C-alpha cells in the first residue's frame, strides 16, 4: 500500500511532536549519541536548546562547529544510557 502525502505529513508532525517532547528534557552539557539516517552514530554534547524542545544544538566530539537539529528532522538523540530522554 502506497503512503499518501497526508499520511507522510501526519507522520512528520508526529515525529516532530515526539522529538520536541523528548528534547525538552535534555540539559545543556549532557552527553548524547546522535543517530542520523544511515550514518554511524556519533557522540556529542548538548550545546543549547530551545525551551520547547523544538531545536537543539549539538557539538559533536572532536568538532569545533555545532549542528542544529529541528524536532522534525529524521534524527535520534539518545542519552548516554542509550535511550531517548524521558517524556
Image (cartoon, helix red, strand yellow):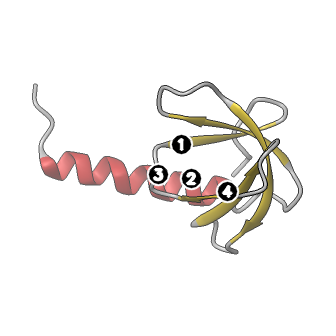
Residue designated by label 4: 23
The residue furthest bottom is 51
Confirm or deny contact between disc 4 and disc 2 (CB under 8 A): yes
Is disc 2 surrounded by few (<14), some (14 to 19) or many (20+) residues within 10 Å?
many
Q: Where's the N terminus, which quadrant?
A: top left
Q: Secondary structure at mark 4?
A: helix
Residue designated by label 2: 19
Q: Secondary structure at mark 1?
A: strand
Residue designated by label 1: 75
Give the CA distance from mark 3 to mark 4. Answer: 12 Å
Q: Secondary structure at mark 2?
A: helix
- Mark 1 against mark 2, which lies toward the viewer? 1
Q: Give whichever of 13, 40 is nearer the camera.
A: 40
Q: Secondary structure at mark 3?
A: loop
Please tell me the numbered disc located at residue 73.
3
Confirm or deny contact between disc 1 and disc 4 (CB under 8 A): no
Q: Say whether disc 1 or disc 2 marks the residue closer to the N-terminus.
A: 2
Q: Residue at x 89, y 57 (%)?
A: 29
Confirm or deny contact between disc 3 and disc 4 (CB under 8 A): no
Give the CA distance from mark 2 to mark 3. Answer: 9 Å
Amino acid at each position: 500500500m502506497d503512503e499518501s502525502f497526508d499520511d507522510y505529513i501526519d507522520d512528520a508532525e508526529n515525529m516532530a511532536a515526539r522529538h520536541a517532547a523528548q528534547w525538552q528534557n535534555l540539559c545543556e552539557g549532557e552527553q548524547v549519541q546522535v543517530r542520523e539516517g544511515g550514518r554511524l552514530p556519533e557522540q556529542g554534547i548538548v550545546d543549547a536548546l530551545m525551551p520547547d524542545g523544538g531545536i537543539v544544538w549539538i557539538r559533536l566530539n572532536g568538532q569545533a562547529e555545532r549542528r542544529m537539529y529541528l524536532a522534525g528532522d529524521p534524527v535520534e538523540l539518545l542519552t548516554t544510557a542509550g535511550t531517548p530522554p524521558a517524556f
